Amino acid sequence: MSNYASASQRITWNGVNLTDGYLGSNLSKAGDLQQMDIDLMGNACVSQLADQSGTYTITLRQGSEALKRIDQIAAGVQLIGDVFSIPFQGVITHEDPVQGNSFVGWNACLVSVGDSDWAATAGERTVSFRISKVINTDDPISVLANIKDFVLK
């Protein structure tokens, strides 16, 4: 029997903790890692596919510190992004220490801050990141410590 604990998960983007107000997340990969083609003679050819990207969405509680940080970054991109160099893309990590179902995302770019809804109770908002390379791992820290061995090949 395996265990799962959503409260043990930790999400960071460029070192900024995005876990406060965490209500759930989803990682959707763009495609397969490799493709195998077999000719009529039974010979296989394996191609490593270049597109190893994905889209990562995080649902956060309205008013959470994580959403406030994301909104500040988005405002910076909107207001001064064309004038100043700000870290609008970088490394995103999702650590799940209980199940080890973690990943590191290289060149993660905030693409949507989500839609807002105001009602009688606190709502939620889903933000999206586009990631150029998704690396599944049970040890994100080791991947980051040895990033050149994993990404810069």
Image (cartoon, rainbow, N blue to C red):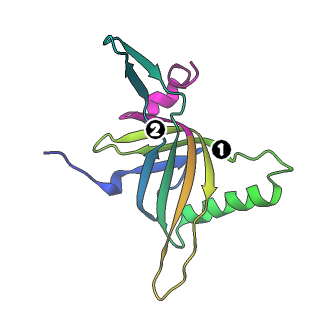
Q: Please give the residue where the numbered disc 1 appears in the rendered image.
A: 89
Dot 2: what SS? loop
Q: Which amino acid does label 1 sit on?
A: Gln
Residue at the limit of the structure toward the left, as seen here? 1
- At horizontal 75% and vertical 58% (from top left) the residue drawn is 76
Dot 1: what SS? strand
Of callouts 1 and 2, the N-terminal one: 2
- At horizontal 52% and vertical 55% (from top left) the residue drawn is 18
- On whether residue 150 falls in the magenta region, the answer is yes
Residue 49 shows in the view = yes
Q: Position of residue 29 (x, y in %)?
A: 45, 42
Q: Where is residue 139 in the image (x, y as percent from the top left)?
A: 39, 33
- At horizontal 48% and vertical 77% (from top left) the residue drawn is 123
Instruction: Mark 1: give few (<14), some (14-19) or many (20+) Cα within 10 Å.
Output: some
- At horizontal 65% and vertical 44% (from top left) the residue drawn is 89
- On whether residue 141 falls in the magenta region, the answer is yes
Q: Classify the position of the N terminus by image quarter.
A: top left
Q: Position of residue 31 (x, y in %)?
A: 46, 38
Identify the magenta region. 132-153
Contact flag, marks 1 and 2 (Cβ < 8 Å) = no
Name above or below for residue 112 compared with residue 89: below
Q: Is residue 39 left or right of residue 56?
A: left
Q: Please give the residue where the numbered disc 2 appears in the rendered image.
A: 31
User: How far is mark 1 from mark 2, CA to CA?
Assistant: 22 Å
Q: Position of residue 143 (x, y in %)?
A: 47, 29
Residue 20 shows in the view = no
Q: What residue type is labelled 2?
A: Gly
Q: In this view, does 113 lie to the left or right of 7?
A: right
Q: In this view, does 70 lie to the left or right of 142?
A: right
Image quarter for residue 68? Answer: bottom right
The one of 124 and 55 positioned closer to us in this rendering: 55
